[in-house]
Each structure stands twice: as structure tokens, then as C-alpha cells.
Image: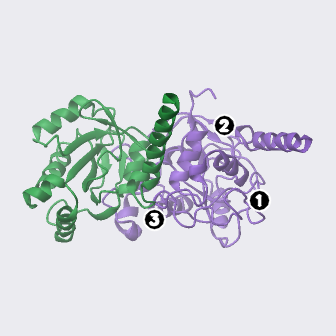
Chain colours: A green, B purple
Amino acid sequence: MKRRAALIGALAWAGVLVSQAADVPGDSLYQLRATLATQGGTQAGFDLYRGHPAVLSMFYGSCPAYCPMLITAVQVYESHLDQTSRARLRVLLVSFDAAHDTPQRLAELARLHRADPQRWTFASAAEPDARRIAALLGFHYRRLEDGSFDHSQILALVDAEGRMVASTTKLIGDAAFEAKLRALTASSPP
Amino acid sequence: MLAGCAATGALLLWAWAASAAGNPFLPVAGAEFRSTLPSGRQDKVVVRGFLLQRHPVTNAEFLAFVSTHREWQRGSAPVILADAGYLGHWAAPLDPGPGAAASQPVTRVSWFAAQAYCEAQQARLPSWYEWELAAAASATQRDARADASWRQQILDWYAHPAGDAPAVVEQGAANVYGLYDIHGLVWEWVHDFDSLLPADADPERFCGSGAQNLQEKENYAVLMRIALLGSLRAADTGHTIGFRCARDAGATR
């Protein structure tokens, strides 16, 4: 009897896992199964902030100008939110240069920019996952012969289910993007 | 019971025919190569030797894949990874039907689907440089791009109306590597398809900022590929876009 109860429990648990995966909407970015290495030295899925509105973007850490600019830009956008809304928002920045952006370097970046570890994650993705994430976000990058990267810039705003609500190529002062950000974080559960 | 065994046998035989055995990975020697794409300061790029499939992946080969990967069957694949046209010309999710012959290249597959297929073969999509290196070869030369008659042959294909379904694979001549149909049947996805032009180039204005940095400008056929690939999104499917897979040269399978 006990065994049967355990079995039923296991089946119910398996059912929960399956239905959770199936619940992700077809137009959700979280349909992508990709593996991230995070600043904490752990592995995470691309959907680690599922359940929260989130800003997603990509970068590489050794870029002297763009990387700090991107981080500052997101911090400026979220500084325009009230405290309650800001507490709901999550930020995931994925490096496409996994060879160089080790968990240690990512953690260093997070410290340097005083990124709130409760709400921000710096991570890296190896190929081909990095290219997949980029394709979903509409981000472009290409390694040049000298080892640097030619890349575009984009901030993507997704809802709690991972559906793209807005995106912008303007790191600063996109009023429409900011309005969407405000509306989404005002209405989401904490 | 006997019928069941025979059916299983037939299925196995069919699965074997559709497996990599029927579409082997052939070596393409590495080269220092003058790409059409601007490559920073250097004039040439170094492409390491790699392996490339002999022909574009066919309907039969792709059917074998979706049979064992339910998540990539039409109707199951999420719309964010494959748009509404995904395998739209097949009769049913597990039946290409009369409109998609077994040895025609599979088309209407998204970049995500093509990637998933290659991974299931312990392979990957070729990079643009790899594809371009393989595509520079004629039946007799590794780099035939300066050969005006060879270039014209390719352009003649691009001038064909794209309305009809592509012909079956391996009907023409192989190039020096033994590869078929690099030109002439379908466009092919590459791993970095969406990042070929400089990031600040606007794909809608290909003739402006995008094209001015390109090299080998007389090679129109390749320029058209770059323009086409640059206009696609990874979930797009089209009736002229297929793919083939690549492996690192060191891979033993």
C-alpha cells in the first residue's frame, strides 16, 4: 500500500514536470532548451527567470566599451521604475564568448557594476546554444579574425511566460520600450 | 505476426537507407581563403578542414529524424522555433506524401529544425566560411570562382523560376570534394546565417552599407546567398531553403 502510494506520488510528480514543460506557450522564448553557465558557477536553463518579467540581452565581457554601456543602460531603464515594479523585474545577460567569460569573470562583472544578485544574472552560453539564443532575441554577432566580435545591440523584454513584449536597439531613451517595461512590471505578480 | 516482422524489416531497411550511410560526410581540406565577407583587417580567412554531407538532407532522411523526435513533427514544433509553414508541403506529420519525394531535398525547415537534425546526427550546421569554401569548387578545381563559364552556370540556376519543387539529389556532377548540389537545388542554412553582414548594416539596404565591404563582388551568386540568408529569421521556413550537416575533421563517426 505504501509502495503504491509512493508510485502514485511519483507519477503525479512526473505529471507535474511534464505539464509544466507543456505549459510554456508556443510563442515563448523559453521553448528553447539551452544551457547557461552562471556567475555563481552553476548551470541554469535559458528559462531561469520564468515567472518574472525580464530583460534579456547578450554581450561579451572583454569588450571594453559596449559591455559596461549595456549594463549601465539596463540599470538606467530600471532606475525609472518605482521600487515595487523594479523588485519584480529580472535581468539576464548572456555572454556569447563562453571561452573567456568564465563564472569568475562573470561574478567579477556583477560585483563591479553592483548588479543585484537577487534579480540579475550574468551567464555564458557555448555554441550552438549561444547562436540559438541570439537568433531568438534578434541579436547578431560574428567573430573576427583578430578574436574580437562584430555584434549588434538589443534589449528584449519578455513577460513571465517568456513571450517577447518589446525589444529595442536603443540602449538609451527608447520611450516606447520604457512604457512597455513600466506597464509589464506594474501588472506582474511579485 | 509475419506481416509485422516484414514491415519491421522494411522499416529497418528504409531507416538504414535514410541514415548517414546514404548521405556520408566527405572531407573538405582546410584552406586560407578569400571570402566574400569582409573579415576585419585580414584579406583572407583560415578555414580548417571539416566534413560535409554529400547532398542536402532529403525528405526521407528528415522523416527518419522526426519519426524519433516527436517534438520536431509538424504540429508539435513550437511556432517560435518553426513558423506556420514548417513542413507544410508534406501530406501529414509522418508522411511526406506525393508532393515531397523521398530523395528530394527537404525544404520548409527552419534554422532551429535544421540544427536539431544535425545534432541528432552528432553533427552541426556548417559555418558560412565552410559552406563558401565548399561552394567555390567546380568538378575540377578547388577554387573555380575566377572561371567565368562556371560562374555563369550557377547564375543560370538562380534565374530559374522557384515555383517548382526541387529536383532529386545527386543528378548533376559532383565537385572536386565529391559533394553534390551545393548550387542548383536549394538554398542552405548555415550556422551563422544571421550574422554575415556587419552588425551596423541594414539588411533592407543591402546595396548601401551592407554590400560596400564585400569582396569578390563579381561572384553574384554568392552575394545573393548572403542577401537571402541575411533577410531570414531563424524560425522562417521557405520552399527553397534546405540544409546539409557538417562535422569537425577530427570527428570519428
Count neighbours of disc 2 (C-alpha within 10 A) and say few if under 14, some if 14 to 19, many if 20 or more: some
Instruction: Give the residue type that dot 2 points to.
Output: Leu
Q: CA distance from mark 2 to mark 3?
A: 30 Å
Q: Residues within 10 Å of mark 3 (few under 14, many from 20)?
A: some
Q: Is residue B147 left or right of residue B33?
A: right
Count the marks. Answer: 3
Same chain shared by disc 2 and disc 1: yes
Image position, residue A35 (x, y; %): 39, 39
The residue at which mark 1 appears reads as: B101
Instruction: Find disc 3 in the rendering and name its residue.
Output: B231
Amino acid residing under circle 3: Ser
Q: Position of residue B227 (x, y in %)?
A: 47, 63
Secondary structure beneath disc 2? strand
Subunit under mark 2: B
> How far apart are the alpha carbons under marks 1 and 3?
28 Å
- Residue A168 horizontal/vertical position (percent): 25, 63
Residue B52: quadrant of the picture: top right
First of labels 1, 3 by sequence position: 1
Mark 2 and mark 3 lie on one chain; the one further toward the N terminus is 2
Tell me which numbered mark, 2 or 1, is placed earlier along the sequence.
Answer: 2
Q: Is residue B132 visible?
A: no
Separation of disc 2 and disc 1 at Cα? 24 Å
For badge 1, the amino acid type reads: Ala
Residue B6, image x, y percentages:
88, 42
Residue bearing the label numbered 2: B26
Q: Nearer the viewer, residue B223 or B10?
A: B10
Chain hosting mark 1:
B
Residue at 65% over, 46% down: B65
Local secondary structure at mark 1: loop
Q: Is residue A78 left or right of residue B145?
A: left
Q: Could you tell whether A144 is left or right of B169 in the image?
A: left
Q: Residue furthest toward the right?
A: B2
